[in-house]
Image: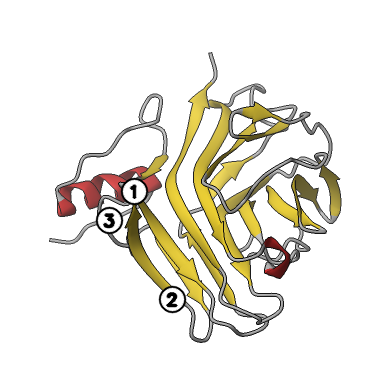
Amino acid sequence: MTLHIDTVEQAMAITALMDGSARNIMANSDMPFLTEFWETEALVAALWDSTIDGGGTEAFATAQGRMYYDIDTDAVIDNDVFINSKYRWQIQPFYFSGANVIVEKFILEWEAELEGAITFHDNTHFFMGLSSAKDNDITQNGLIGFYLDSDVLKGKTDNGGTESTTGAIAATLTNWNKFRIEISDTSVIFSFNGVAQTEIITNLPNLSMYIVLGTRNETGASPLGMNIGNVRAWYEEAA
């Protein structure tokens, strides 16, 4: 029997059938969705790619009852570790809620914890969010995500090389934190631990994007890591 996987939803359904696990469906009217709680105890090859440079490592892990995916660099400068979705999501805020469209907004949320000194994480290659390329370089065009600006957490949108950013977000990134990005037709709202930042209403890219979560070792002084907890993404339907 040959399986044809055309959407994220189909991949999730097939994975659920194959591994016997239950999936929480965050979707309306069977639109594409993703829920990743690591109950498979592995990176699902049908859904995720990983880039682990050099002697870096990746593995399912647990701590204090929490299940997560652990990606770590080795103690080498410019060592990258990141995971990205194999599937792209339609991120078109100017068209959401317009005439003849199905979706009203797109929402991505996840939990994460950084390992190692924040000053050792490369500001240009620490990225969590949505990117038009399977890459964690925040200088590239077409992205919406959290990044580090002089080791301070902020949110950013980029449309064709022109950017808009949030203010500084007070964060202890070596704790477990919840991140959320909500994209509608007129704005992007970044939330950190349930607190929404001032919405961004300019430089909203209309692109298909991958989910990208990862970091880079800036100094090579010690290994660095990112623990990725629950991840979910879904569309909300226009009324």
| In front: label 2 or label 3 | 2
Tags 2 and 3 touching, CB below 8 Å: no
Is residue 23 placed above or below 71 in the rendered structure?
Answer: above
Distance, label 1 to label 3, CA atoms, is 38 Å
Q: Quick check: 233 left or right of 204? A: left
Q: Which residue is mark 1?
A: 64
Residue 119, visible in the rendered structure? yes
Tags 1 and 2 touching, CB below 8 Å: no
Q: Quick check: 159 left or right of 194? A: right
Q: Position of residue 18 (x, y in %)?
A: 16, 54
Q: Position of residue 141 (x, y in %)?
A: 76, 58
Q: Which residue is mark 3?
A: 4
Distance, label 1 to label 2, CA atoms, is 21 Å
* Residue at position x 49%, y 45% in the image: 111
Other-residue count near label 1 (Cα within 10 Å), few / some / many at <14 / 14–19 / ≥20: few
Q: Which residue is mark 2?
A: 57
Tag 1 secondary structure: loop
Q: Earlier in the sequence, mark 1 or mark 2?
A: 2
Other-residue count near label 2 (Cα within 10 Å), few / some / many at <14 / 14–19 / ≥20: some
* Residue at position x 51%, y 46% in the image: 176
Residue 155 lies in what quarter of the image? top right
Is residue 130 placed above or below 78 in the rendered structure?
Answer: above
* Residue at position x 84%, y 56% in the image: 161
The amino acid marked with disc number 3 is His
Tag 2 secondary structure: strand
Which corner quadrant holds the N terminus? bottom left
